[in-house]
Image (tube, rainbow, N blue to C red):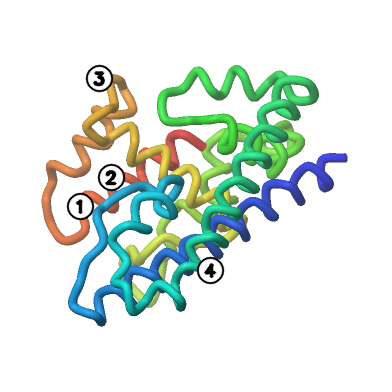
Amino acid sequence: ESQAHMAIIRSREVLVRTRTQLVNHVRGAVKSFGARLPKCPAVSFHKRAKEHIPEALRPALGPVLETIGSLTRRIREYDRQLEAISTQTYPETGLLRQVEGIGPLTALTFVLTLEDPYRFERSRSVGAYLGLVPATDRSGDRDPQRRISKEGDEMLRKLLVSGAHYVLGPFGSDSDLRRHGEKIASRGGKNSKKRAAVAVARKLS
């Protein structure tokens, strides 16, 4: 049953990626004609972009916009399904959603990916399981830290990082998580904000 529910999440993710590719295609085509489309979220792109498409490109891009609109409707249907599944089958997701930055999709993906949390001896092990800890390259006396290992489930890792960006963003409220990320970001250096987001995602996991 959990695999069947995870299949819904992964199917939704495929549609989201496909929509992103189509949106980028439309923006690129319009840009090549010397025009630009307004900034807007993907959910409203097919409506907002339509009136800004150059006349000469409408035969080529009109069907693409219709497909984007259809994908958006399908994604919303998946969202409604997943909300119902979370509430009816996995009530523990409600506890996870009390954490700022964690929505129904992230909570359900987390529960279905980990399945049995008691197989982890320590909660910190989850971060390593999801590839949110730095890989190391030990050689002699050197032990430099590299980028995160990116092992484990890529989709859940991205969802947690997205939640971390919300915690650290303009709409995130003051919290231990936010202060933890801000402390890391304040150290400066290259990619300090990315490191802060990964650190908060690791704490979330």
| Residue 50 image position (x, y, % from top left) | 37, 58
Disc on the earlier residue, 3 or 4 = 4
Q: For the residues labelled 2 and 1, say whether their Cβ atoms are less than 8 Å apart.
A: yes
Crowd class of label 1 (few under 14; some 14 to 19; many from 20; radius 10 Å): some
Mark 2 to mark 1: distance in Å? 6 Å
Mark linked to residue 192: 1
Mark 4 to mark 1: distance in Å? 42 Å
SS under mark 2: helix
Disc on the earlier residue, 1 or 3 = 3
Amino acid tagged 1: Ser
Mark 1 to mark 3: distance in Å? 20 Å
| Residue 120 image position (x, y, % from top left) | 67, 38
Residue at the (53%, 53%) spot, across then down: 69
Q: Quadrant of residue 202?
A: top left
Residue that mark 3 sits on: 174
Residue that mark 2 sits on: 196
Residue at the (20%, 52%) spot, across then down: 192
* Nearer mark to the viewer, of 3 and 2: 3
Q: Is residue 26 positioned above or below 174 on the image?
A: below
Residue that mark 4 sits on: 63
Disc on the earlier residue, 3 or 2 = 3
Query: Considering depth in this image, is 165 or 150 the residue closer to the camera?
Result: 165
* Nearer mark to the viewer, of 4 and 1: 4
